[in-house]
Image (cartoon, rainbow, N blue to C red):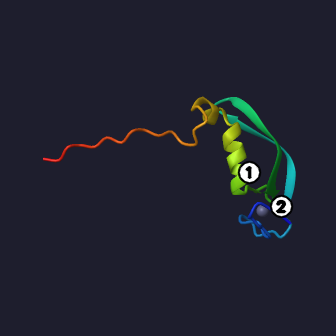
Amino acid sequence: MNTGGLVVSVCPTCGSPDIRMVRGSWVGNYKGETYSVKELQYYSCPNCGEKVYSPEAMRRIQEASPAFLKSGGRQAERKPRQTLPLG
Ligand SMILES: [Zn+2]
């Protein structure tokens, strides 16, 4: 079984063993803009509502986010590092 490298058997928030992997559309909100990721797999706890995402799921969320698209598809905004002359 391939779970993307992440195995969660108990909820990290409440310790419930009922947490399980679900698959479905995920809807997020960024500065008033909604965006969705289809067929996303993540863990959901029915007890406290906690959601746990695998690194792959987080990457898919990030790639669907307006912030990511506006930055031209780069993963992180990179600013040139300024070096100050010493002395
Ligand atoms: Zn929980």
Circle nearer the viewer, 1 or 2: 1
Which label number is shown at residue 12?
Answer: none
Say which residue appears at 28% left-offset and 43% top-offset. 83
Above or below for 13 versus 76: below
**Residue 64 rendering spot, x and y as whole percentages:** 71, 37
**Residue 32: x %, y % from top left:** 67, 29
User: In which of the image's four quarters is ligand 1 placed?
Assistant: bottom right
Which mark is on residue 57?
1
Q: Which mark is residue 47?
A: 2
Of residue 83 and residue 43, the one placed in the foreground of this image is: 83
Kind of residue at badge 1:
Ala
Kind of element beneath mark 1: helix
Q: Is residue 83 left or right of residue 1?
A: left
| Residue 45 location (% of width, % of height) | 82, 59
- Residue 53 sits in quarter: bottom right
Disc 2 marks a residue whose amino acid type is: Asn
Quadrant housing residue 31: top right
Q: Determine the CA span between mark 1 and mark 2.
A: 22 Å
Q: Residue at x 77, y 67 (%)?
A: 8
N-term-proximal mark, 1 vs 2: 2
